[in-house]
Image: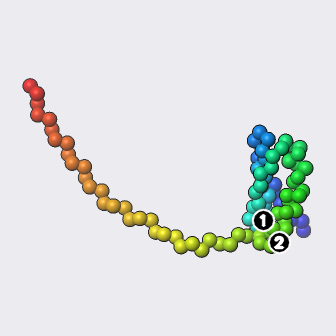
Amino acid sequence: MSEEIKIVITLKDQTATIGVQRTGCDPVFTKVEGSLPAVLKGIPKLVEGAKKGWELNARNPKCETPITPPATPRPTTQPAKPKQQPPMF
């Protein structure tokens, strides 16, 4: 069975952001300078590099940093009622 690989290209001016993803693996992103035809010529090399990286480590390690609980909110005090201004007349 063939394996599905997704390739996404975002082109802005002369810079392309390319993402390569395979099911069960973390995506690989890179930026390439050049026109669309030039960028497309480099896609096979990027896919091969991504495949080699996935063979070594398909997923980045899970983050084990402890999550700090959110700060408890301070009780708010009621704003003082404005003093009524005495009538002028």
Q: Amino acid at mark 1?
A: Thr
Which of the pair 38/62 is nearer the observer? 38
Name of the residue lying farthest toward the front: 33
Asked whether the residues under the numbered discs 2 and 1 touch, taking CB atoms below 8 Å apart as contact, a structural biologist would say: no
The N terminus is located in which quarter? bottom right
- Asked where in the image residue 28 lies, by quadrant, the reply is bottom right
Give the labeled residue for mark 2.
Answer: 55
Whether residue 10 sits left or right of residue 47 in the image: it is left
Residue 50 showing in the rendered view? yes
Residue shown at 83%/60% (left/top)?
5
Name of the residue lying farthest toward the left: 89
Q: Position of residue 38 (x, y in %)?
A: 88, 45
Compute the Cα span from label 2 to label 1: 13 Å
Residue 23 disc label? 1
Residue shown at 78%/47% (left/top)?
16
Q: Position of residue 52 (x, y in %)?
A: 85, 68
